[in-house]
Amino acid sequence: MSLPGEIKRRIQMLFHRDQLNRDLEEEMRLHLDLRRQQQIDRGLTESAAARTAHLKFGNITRIKEKSLMTWGSETLECFLQDALYGIRAMLRSPALTLVALLSLALGIGANTAIFSLLDAVLLRSLPVKDPHQLLLMGTGDWNGTSDAFALTDAYSYPFYRQFQQKNAVFSSTAAIFSMLNQAHGFVLDPTGRASIEAEPMNIQLVSGTYFETLGVEAQHGRVFTDADDNSEGDHPVAVISNAWWKRNLASDPSVLSRRLKLGDTVFTIVGVVPPEFFGTKVGEAPDIWIPLSMMKSVPPHWAGYKDNFSESLLLFGRLKSGVSSQQATANVNLLFQQILRSFPNAKLNQENLEKLAKAHVPLTSMATGLSDLRGQFSEPLQILMAVVALVLLIACANIANLLLARSTARARELAVRQALGAQRGRIIRQLLTESLILALTGGALGIVLASAANRLLLHMVSGGLDNIPLDVSLNIRLLLFTFVVTIATALIFGTIPAFRATRLQLTDTLKSGRSPQGVGARNPLARILVISQVALSLVLMVGAGLFLRSLINLTNIDTGFNKENVLRLRIDFSSAGFKNDDPRQTALYNTITERVSALPGVKASSFSSFTFREGSWNGYINVPGMPVNHDIDVKHNIIGAGYFATMQIPLIAGRGFDSTDTATSQRVAIVSEHMARTLFPNGQALGRSYHIGDPKSPYEQQVIGIARDVKFDDLTENPEDIDYLPFFQGNCCLNSFELRYTGNTGSISTAVQQTIHSIDRTLPISGITTLDDEVARSITNQRLVAQLSTFFGLLAVFLYSIGIYGLMSYVVSRRTNEIGIRMALGAARSNVRSLILREIALLVAIGIAIGIPAALTADRYVTHMLFGVKSTDPAALLAAVALLLTVAVCAGYFPARRAARVDPMEALRYE
Amino acid sequence: MSRDEIPPGTLYLLILKTLAVRGVLHGCEFAESIQHHSEDILQVEEGSLYPALQRMLVKGWVAAEWGVTAGNRRARYFTFTADGRKQLAVELNKFERIMAAVNRVILTSQ
C-alpha cells in the first residue's frame, strides 16, 4: 500500500465526487435488481420480492454514505461546504458584511503595518551568518570620537589590534568607525576620467575582518581581508553595496575594474556585497565600505589610526563555540584593563586609575544590529502596537455584536436544523467557519491596506527627508503574524455568538421564529460589548489627547534662536580637497559670506560648526579662580561674525565679534548665559579669561560677550554650557552655512547655491533645509505617536459609533411592538425618543465610568514620554468624555427617530 | 437457516481470495461467491461489502472498470492489482497466524 498513491487517489476523488456518487448508486441498483430477480425466481410476487430484496440489502443511503466516508475527506468536504454556505450568507446581507470587512481590514491592517515597522527596527536579525553569536563591546550608543580614559563604548585602532591578538573568546573580532562618513567623491569611468560633479557617497570605515566576522561573502569579487587593514594608507580598496552598484554604476558588469576618487586618493572597487546585506546599523545603509587603514584618505580625513587614545571605533566579535557570554565578559574586561595600562602614553594618575577600576565593559548582543532609530522609536512603536491592538479588539466587539444580532434573526433556521438532527457541535463548527471566512477576507484586505500604509509610515518616520533605508516590505514573518492575528480575531468574535446561537429552546423558536432569550432588548452580552467598546475608546482618546498636547507644548518651546526664515546648508570643503587651516578655505568663508549677504532678500549669513542638532564638539575648560572640575563639558561652536545676526540670538552683555578681532589680536570668546553663571566666579564672565582644555594649553580666550541660552541638540534639554569662538582666529571645521532671508525659500536657495558655485565650482553642497524643518524633525517620534494615536483613537470612536448605531437599530426593531403598545397607551413621540436615548446614555455612562480608571492606569506608563502635561490631565479626560457622549448621541439619534416614527397600528399588527 | 456473520478482520481476505480465484467480479457476485463457497454459512452484508470495496479502491488493492453483465446490465467489475496480490499474501499470513494461536489456546485448555 503506497502512501503517495493513496493520497493522490484521495485528492483525485475530491474532483470526481459526483461521479463516484452516481457510480455507487448504479452499482447498488444493479445489486438490488439482481436480488429482486432472485426472490422472484424463488416464487415471490413482484412487490413481495422487491420488499424482501430491499430489506435484505439494508439502508441504501446509509451504505452509500459509509462507502463515501472511506475516502476520508469528510472534514475537508464539510469545511468547503461550510465555507461556501458562509460566503452565500455573507452576500445575502451585504451591508453587514461590508461593515464587518471594513472594520476587520482597518483593524488587522493597522496591526500589520505597525508590526512591520516594529519588526524592522527592533526584532529582525541582521542578514548575516548566525547573528546570535555576535557580541558588541559596550552599549553601542556611541557616535563620535573621544580621548577620554577608560571609555567602555568606543575604542582606538591600536586597542582593537591588541584585543584582536590577545583575546581568547572571539573566533573573529572586527571594528567599525562609529560615524558614517558623508562625503562627496567622483566615480571614474573605465577610461579613468572623473565625473564632472562630485556625488554624495555614504562611506563606512571598517576593519579588514568586518565581513569575515559577519560571515558575509561578496556576490562579485571579494570582501576585505585582515591584510587590507594592516598598514596605514596603502590599501586603496573599496567594497560597494548592491543598491549603489545598481544606482550609480548602472549595474556595470565590469564593476571590479571601476575606480572612485575620494579626496586625493583613487580607490579600486574589489567587490560587491549581496543585495540583502545593508551593513550593521539598522536605518543606515552605507554605499561604500573602506578599510580603516585608509581613514586619513577619506574626507573628512580622520587621523586616529595610530593614536592609542583616539577612541572612535565600535568593537564586536563572533563568540567561539563552547564559550559562554559570562566567560567572554570576564575575558574582555580583563584585557580591557591590561591593554589600557600597557599603552606607553597612558596617563595613570589617580583620577584615571579610579575611572579604570570602576569601568565595566558590558557585552551586548549584535543579533539585531546597531541602531540609533531603536532608541528613538522603540517605545513609541510599542505604544502604537498596544493602540492598534485595542482598535482591533473594538472592531472585534463590533463584529461580535453584529453576528449576535444576525444569529438571532437566523434562530428559526438553526432551530429547524437542530430539530432535523444536526449536532450542535456541527452547527457551531459551521458558524465558526463562517467567522473564519469573514476574518480571512478581512485579513487579506488588511494586508493590502498595510502595504499602502507602510510607505506612509516610513515617510513619517523619516521626518520628511529622504526615506530612511528600512525594509518594511511584506515578508514571511509579517504574513505569519497577520495570519495568527486573523485566526485569533475570528475566534474572539465568532465563538460566543456561535455558542449563543445554538442554545435554543427548539419548540418555542420554531413557533415564534425568534429565540426568547435572544431578544436584544434584554440581552446583556450585547450591552457588555458596547460598554467595553466605550471604555477602550475612552482610553485611546485620552491617550491621544495627552500626546497631542505634549506635541503642541514641544512645538511651542522657545529655542533661544529665531528658527523662522533661516536656510541652512552644508558645504563639504573636505571632499573638495581643502585641508584643515588652509588659508584658502578661510578666504572662501569670507568671500561666500560677503557675496551671499549681498543677495536681495538675504539679511545676514554666516558659517558655523553647528546650528541645531548637528552634533557637537565638547571639551573641558579651565577657569582660573574656579576649582578644577574634569566633568565640565563645554560645547564649542566656531562661528563667523554674522552668526548672532543670522540666528537672531540676542547678546545680553558685551559685544559680538567684529573687525577688531583678527588672527593676531587677543583671542576672544562669547559664552552662553548658563556657562557664565555656573562656570565663572561670582557668575561674572565678562572680561575674564579661560583656557580651553589643559590649563597649560596656549589657548587663552577672553570673554567679550554673553549670549542668551539656546537649545543645541534637543528641544527638551536643560540649558547647556556653550561658548562661541571666531573662525578667523585660527579655528577650523565650519560645516554649516546659514542665512536669514525673506521671500520665497526655493528661489533664495537656488540663488545662494548659484552664488557659491560661481565662487568655486567644485564645492559640493548638500543637506539644504530650513531651520524650521530641522527643529520639527527633532520631534519626529513624538509627532508620530501623537498623529497616529489620534488617528487610531478617532478610528476607534468611528467603529464604536457604528456599534452603537447597529445595536440600537436592532433593539428598536425587536421592541417595535412594545413601542407600539406604549404609544397606543398614550406615550408621546418624544417620550419614545428619549427612552432610546436614555438607554444609550446609560450604556455610555457605564463605559466611561469603567474607562476613566483604566485610562488613568494606562497613562501612568507613558508619563515619561509626555512634555508639559501630566498623565492625569483633566482637560484631555473631559475632551474625550465629551467626544464619546456626542458621538453616541449622534449615532443613536437615527434609531431613536425611527422608534418615534413607529406606527402603533403596524406595530400591534406585527404580533 | 440464519447464516453466521463474517468474522471481523477477515472480510478483506475473503474478497481478495475470491478475486484470486474468480479473476474479475462485480459487487453482487462477490457476495454470492462467498456465500456459495462457504456453503451458505458465511453471509456478507451489503452494508459491509460496499465500504470494504471502496476502502480497497482507496488503498489501491483493487482496480475498478465498468463492464456489461450477462444480463446486459452495466456493472462495475473489480480486478486485482499488484499491491492487491501482495496484500492477499499478507492477509493470509495474518489469518493463519491468528488461527494457529487460537488453536493452541483451544487445545491447551482441553
Image (cartoon, grey):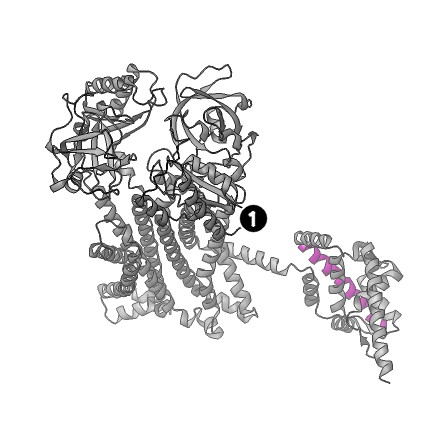
Q: Nearer the viewer, residue A119 or A817?
A: A119
Magenta region: A17-43
Report x, y in % for residue A881: 24, 58
Report x, y in % for residue A701: 18, 30
- Reading the image, the residue beneath label 1 is A321
Tell me which secondary structure the magenta stretch mostly adopts.
Answer: helix
Magenta run includes residue A231: no
Question: What residue is drawn where x is 26% and y is 41%?
Answer: A714
Q: Identity of the amino acid at label 1? A: Ser
Q: Is residue A606 left or right of residue A204?
A: left
Q: Exactly how many numbered labels are in the figure?
A: 1
Q: Quadrant of residue A858?
A: bottom left
Residue A449: in sight, yes or no? no
Q: Is residue A760 left or right of residue A363?
A: left
Quarter occupied by the C terminus of chain B: bottom right
Report x, y in % for residue A350: 31, 45
Magenta run includes residue A38: yes
Residue A791: in sight, yes or no? yes
